[in-house]
Amino acid sequence: MKSLAPYVMRRLGHGVITVAAIIVLNFIILHLAPGDTVDLLAGEFGAADPQYLADLRARFGLDQPLYIQLGQYFWNVLQLDLGYSFRNATPVLNLILARLPATLILMLTAILVAFTAGLLLGVVSARRVNTLTDDVISVLALLFYATPLFWLGLMGIVLFSVKLGWLPTGGMYTIGGRFNWLQSILDVGRHLILPAMTLALYHMAIYTRLMRASMLEVYNLDYIRTARSKGVMPRRIAFRHVLPNAVLPMVTMVGIQIGTLLGGAVMIETVFNWPGLGRLAFDAVFQRDYNLLLGTMLFASSLVVVINIFTDLIYAVLDPRIGIK
């Protein structure tokens, strides 16, 4: 494992540079948009004295040149100070940390379901290529891939919540419910089923197609033909020789799709009223809460970078052929 240390440090260095670049881009893009928090507050009050508005901008630091504001924001971030949400009257970091567990629960459940189901369906489809089973799996994968997430979510609510009454329509837990710890976990699990499955279906379709194509490619390699000529059982060939090599692109895709997963979480959290970072960022956009929006974007970007580094390390362990130096 000592050989991994330089690789880890190099990837961490790249990650820090990436996050710094994201901070700069997010800051500049948001501040190029017309209006600010002070304008929004003035609009809500109907009118405001120009001197009062100038005092507010001075208080928020909005009267400084953009490069000074950016430098101050960088310095604050280094001290883990993401600013203050004046709309929520709470430090941004506290808001993010309060919403982060909900988003992680939703994302981890969705990616686990999507990866596992996509892996199994891809293996079945590849082992029964050009059969009815393969055709059905391929059509379902294409259907889930092409269907918008918000429509799947709404149809899930209509079917399983409104018509059948099996699952709650939204939220993360039953408001006002008095449960013990086990009942609380089960209650959150019931609320999690619809949003997690909706978010997982799109990614499951991608993993299914990717796993099928990867396995078919490995089946055509010379060492698989050799194993077949020696009379090795097809089941052993599939799970001992083909699967370990075919799963590597799946691991890479998980790291790449974390950003897409976060983007989908914004929509899913809005449809199901799930109290996560996506819903927090959605509200911040409409409230023009720049500090909160910058903080959520920074947190989400950092999460994607960290998960990609972790994915690279897993890939390096699974496939020593990539040649870490």
Image: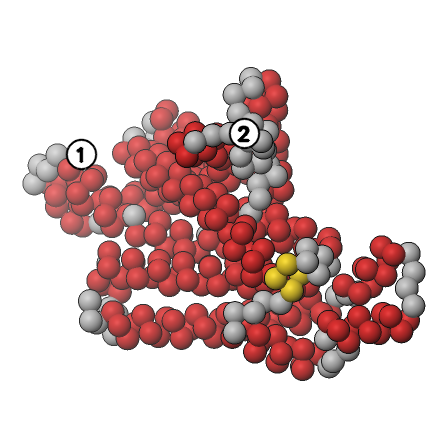
Vertical relation: 47 (above or below) 227: below
- Which label sits on residue 177? 2
Q: Dot 1 corresponds to which residue?
A: 235
Q: Nearer the viewer, residue 104 or 141?
A: 104
Q: Is residue 309 left or right of residue 299?
A: left
Figure quadrant of residue 165: top right
Look at the numbered disc 1 and give the secondary structure of its residue: helix
Q: Is residue 92 left or right of residue 321?
A: right
Vertical relation: 192 (above or below) 294: above
The image shows residue 247 at horizontal and vertical percentages of 29, 48
Are there few (<14), some (14-19), or many (20+) residues within 10 Å of tag 1? few
Q: Residue at x 15, y 37 (%)?
A: 236
Q: Residue at x 54, y 52 (%)?
A: 98
Q: Nearer the viewer, residue 57 or 105?
A: 57
Viewer-side label of 1, 2: 2
Q: Residue at x 84, y 74 (%)?
A: 54
Image quadrant occupied by the N terminus = bottom left
Q: Residue furthest left?
A: 230
Question: Can see residue 220?
Answer: no
Query: Callout 2, which amino acid?
Result: Gly
The image shows residue 294 at horizontal and vertical percentages of 62, 64
Image quadrant occupied by the C terminus = bottom left
- Which label sits on residue 250? none
Sequence-wise, the earlier of marks 1 and 2 is: 2
Look at the numbered disc 2 and give the secondary structure of its residue: loop
Question: Can see residue 295?
Answer: yes
The image shows residue 215 at horizontal and vertical percentages of 29, 43
The image shows residue 84 at horizontal and vertical percentages of 65, 64
Query: Callout 1, which amino acid?
Result: Arg
Q: Nearer the viewer, residue 218 or 308?
A: 308
